[in-house]
Image (tube, rainbow, N blue to C red):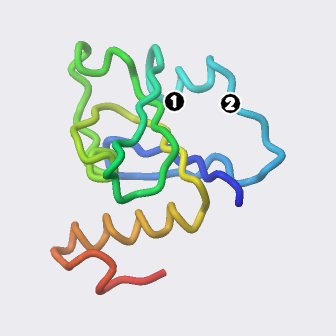
């Protein structure tokens, strides 16, 4: 399975930036440009229901008063701020997490209403 890297912006928009196994990692400078500053790797809690390997966030996001990132916070299970890069284990894992966010925003039970 190939990783799926997704930019999740504070306005709720998302952009898949890597789904190919032969693409190299983004450079440090590219990651910093996406998150708007120094980067910090945030790892999922053991009980996290969404299968991502890590989130790359702005290390100083709280100090800079960056806006809440509601989608990334929902996936992480705790508040995150600023634009982030979420790295899922596979595209299938990303699509499942996306469905959960859509259902939650519509007030439906997870995975019960919308399917991809």
Of residues 82 and 3, the one nearer the viewer is 3
Disc 2 is placed on an element classified as loop
Between label 2 and label 1, give the one nearer the viewer: 2
Q: Is residue 7 above or below residue 66?
A: below
Q: Residue at x 47, y 19 (%)?
A: 39
Where residue 57 appears, as percent x and y from the top left, is 42, 28
- Relative height, residue 105 to residue 21 (above, below): below
Depth check, front residue: 66 or 58? 58
Identify residue for label 2. 26
Give coordinates of residue 107: x percent, y percent: 16, 74
Q: CA distance from mark 2 to mark 1?
A: 10 Å
In screen coordinates, is 113 left or right of 79?
right
32 sits to left or right of 4 = left
The mark nearer the N terminus, 2 or 1, is 2
How many marks overall?
A: 2
Residue 83: image tag: none
**Left or right: where 115 falls relative to 93:** left
- SS class, disc 1: helix
Q: Position of residue 73 (x, y in %)?
A: 27, 45
Q: Residue furthest right?
A: 22
The disc label shown at residue 34, or none = 1
Label 2 close to label 1 by CB (< 8 Å): yes
- Kindly identify the residue that appears in the image at 71 percent across and 60 percent down: 1
Q: Extreme left residue here?
A: 107
Residue at (54% x, 51% y) in the render: 88
């Amino acid at each position: 399975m190939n990783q799926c890297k997704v930019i999740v912006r504070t306005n709720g928009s998302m952009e898949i930036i890597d789904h190919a196994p032969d693409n190299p990692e983004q450079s440090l400078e590219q990651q910093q440009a996406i998150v708007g500053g120094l980067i910090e790797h945030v790892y999922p809690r053991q009980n996290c229901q969404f299968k991502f390997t890590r989130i790359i966030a702005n290390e100083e996001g709280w100090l800079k008063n960056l806006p809440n990132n509601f989608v990334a916070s929902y996936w992480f299970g705790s508040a995150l701020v600023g634009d982030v890069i979420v790295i899922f284990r596979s595209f299938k894992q990303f699509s499942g997490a996306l469905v959960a966010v859509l259902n939650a925003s519509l007030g439906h039970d997870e995975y019960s209403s919308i399917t991809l």
